Image (tube, rainbow, N blue to C red):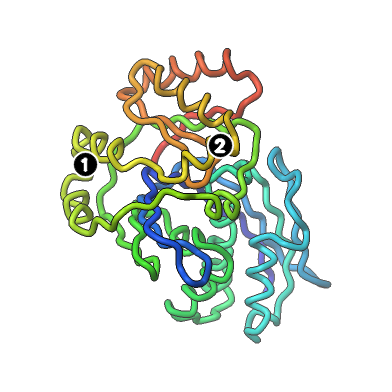
Amino acid sequence: MLIKKSLKAYGKINLYLKVIKKLKNKYHQIETLFCYFDIYDQILVSSSKTSNQITFIGKFSKGISNTNNTILKLLNILKKYPKFNRHKFKIKIIKNLPQGSGLGGGSADASVLLNFFNKNLKLDLKRKTISLICNKIGSDVKPSLNTNFKMLYGSSNKIIELNKRPKLNLLLIYPNCLNSTKSIYLSNKIYSKRTNSEISILKKNILNLSFLFKFLNYKGNDLEQTAFKANKIILKVLTSLKKLKGCKLARMTGTGSACFAIFENKSQLAEAIVVLKKHYKSYWIRKAKII
């Protein structure tokens, strides 16, 4: 079978993130609301006659480990399946999403490839098996199997997919510095209570932007304070975002270092980008569309 395919691995933001507790396996129980946007890593997959080859190119490819990355972890897991081992691949990832940013690029790369291999090689992996594979690679891999608006909560990372999604005028900013997910979680001292009752309220009112912005501003991101101590640039960026005209919400996504802001309308978003690019000339600043 000759394979040649181009895939898109879309980035994500955490609209809010609450840390509930630390688990015995050293991971954390969290509650978060994911949404995905229209900027993506491009993955080129083609058949190889010799061996599996992984190449990272593009603006944000520098510093990615050749011996410890999400794609290599996926391939090593899939090697135990005979249908996968009948093939060898050249995998080239064009990194358009900053690494160490909280935008989920590495997780999305792995999840998109897992879906591709399962379908095209007819691996026939069951839902439970796919879930176990994802969890071995990283906590954001399973949610990234599709780009639906979704909530993740509970000790088993239960996912609730929301059929409706609001239209949001989104701005992304990456301040050219990496945050370590592991160190941010290890240093975190802020924990929140579970709020199961709020989940049903959010599902009913997800398209009510007035309610949504109040809800999100109330919820916050429990990891921000820890990130501020490790990287004061993030606090400066968020302070700048919140001062911009029309900004309804400004927040760090995940463990950072990228931040996002949501604006009341497109013209205010455009004005904000002009202002930010003058002030932060070297930063990665983009407008994005929720998908």
Earlier-in-chain disc, 1 versus 2: 1
Residue bearing the label numbered 1: 207
Which residue is at a point 42% across and 48% down the rendered structure image? 190
Extreme residue toward the front, this view: 189
Which residue is at a point 62% across and 49% down the rendered structure image? 180
**Of 145 and 156, which appears nearest the observer?**
156
Extreme residue toward the right, this view: 50
Name the secondary structure under disc 1.
loop
Q: Nearer the viewer, mark 1 or mark 2?
A: 2
Q: Position of residue 22 (x, y in %)?
A: 45, 63
Is residue 291 visible in the rendered structure shown here? no
Q: Position of residue 3 (x, y in %)?
A: 66, 67
On-image quarter of the N terminus: bottom right
Q: Position of residue 83 (x, y in %)?
A: 63, 83
Question: Does residue 128 sit above or below 6 in this rendering?
Answer: below
Q: How many C-alpha atoms fall within 10 Å of the one at disc 1: few (<14), some, or many (≥20)?
A: some
Q: Between marks 1 and 2, how big is the CA–CA gap?
A: 35 Å
Name the secondary structure under disc 2.
helix
Relative placement, left or right, of 234 versus 148 is right
Residue bearing the label numbered 2: 229
Q: Position of residue 282 (x, y in %)?
A: 66, 23
Relative placement, left or right, of 91 versus 209 is right
Which residue is at a point 63% across and 45% down the rendered structure image? 99
Is residue 73 visible in the rendered structure shown here? yes
Which residue is at a point 70% across and 63% down the rendered structure image? 46
**Mark 1: which amino acid?**
Leu
**Mark 2: which amino acid?**
Lys
Total marks shown come to 2
Q: How many C-alpha atoms fall within 10 Å of the one at disc 2: few (<14), some, or many (≥20)?
A: few
On-image quarter of the C terminus: top left
Relative placement, left or right, of 263 versus 46 is left
Question: Does residue 66 sit above or below 94 in this rendering?
Answer: below
